Image (cartoon, rainbow, N blue to C red):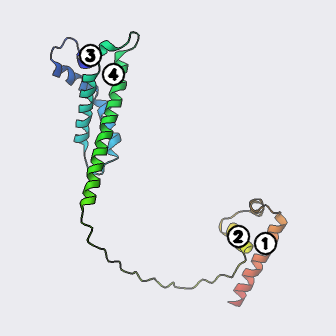
Amino acid sequence: MTYSQHMKPGFPNQEFAFEQLLKRCQPLIHSSVQKYMIVFQERVTQELVHECRKAIWLADQSFDPDDVSPGKNPDDLFNASLRTAIKKQLDQYVKKKSVKHYQLVQETNHDYKLRQERIPQKEPLFQLSFPSFTETEYNFYRMYMIHGYSISQIARKHRVTAHTVHNWRRQTMKTLRNHFRQN
């Protein structure tokens, strides 16, 4: 006895009982299709619905409610097996589609070559000239002026005293002042 016949015991027609099961599983089909639609760029909704129906049919045929141990609900066990069957079926479908796509890509003609054109570099409207900083001056300039760290934060990051960072600031400002006086 299949699960659909167990669910609707009064119907001798197996197809009608399966249709009732499909109606009950519509939300599950819809949510599964929505999850797997992300994988594909093209519209394959009908194919995914067909795969879900096939998984439901296989789960219905393989599940026997009479084999369920006493004390367990056959509906809960069937729902769990149904979800895993749908997931496996859709995973197989995705693998099959990706293999086909890979084979199509491999069969394409690779004889053509794209010609690369050089894009001319635009000349800047004005030249920025920066002074030649030492490493510590550059680090201070970058952290203090550009990133906005405070002197105490810079001291903590470099594991030095705040007095040392004040000296770096003094040296950096002196270098900047001398550079802009010359220009």
Q: Are marks 2 and 4 in contact (CB under 8 Å)?
A: no
Residue 128: x and y in percent read 60, 83
Who is closer to the viewer here, 16 or 104?
Answer: 104
* Location of residue 23 with respect to 175 vertically, above or below: above
Residue 156 placed where, x, y %? 77, 59
- Give the residue at mark 4: 78
Q: Amino acid at mark 4?
A: Phe
**Depth order, front residue of 5/85:** 85
How far separated are the C-alphas under marks 3 and 2?
Answer: 74 Å
Name the element at disc 1. Answer: helix
Q: Residue furthest top?
A: 70
* Crowdedness near tag 3: few (<14), some (14–19) or many (≥20) residues, C-alpha within 10 Å: some
- The image quadrant that residue 150 belongs to is bottom right
N-terminal label among 1 and 3 = 3
Amino acid marked by disc 3: Met
Mark 2 lies on residue: 139
Task: Decide which of tag 1 and tag 2 comes sooner along the chain.
Answer: 2
Q: Amino acid at mark 1?
A: Trp
- Mark 1 crowdedness (10 Å alpha carbons): few <14, some 14-19, many ≥20: some
Left-right relation of 138 to 168: left
Real-space CA distance between mark 1 and mark 3, rounded to the nearest whole angstrom: 81 Å
Camera-near label (4 vs 3) is: 4
- The quarter holding residue 114 reads bottom left
| Mark sitting on residue 7 | 3
Q: Residues within 10 Å of mark 2 (few under 14, many from 20)?
A: some
Residue placed under numbered mark 1 in the picture: 168
In which quadrant of the rendered image does the C terminus lie? bottom right
Q: Quadrant of the N terminus?
A: top left
Q: On the rendered structure, is 155 left or right of 138?
A: right
Residue 152, above or below 90: below
Q: CB under 8 Å between callouts 1 and 2?
A: yes
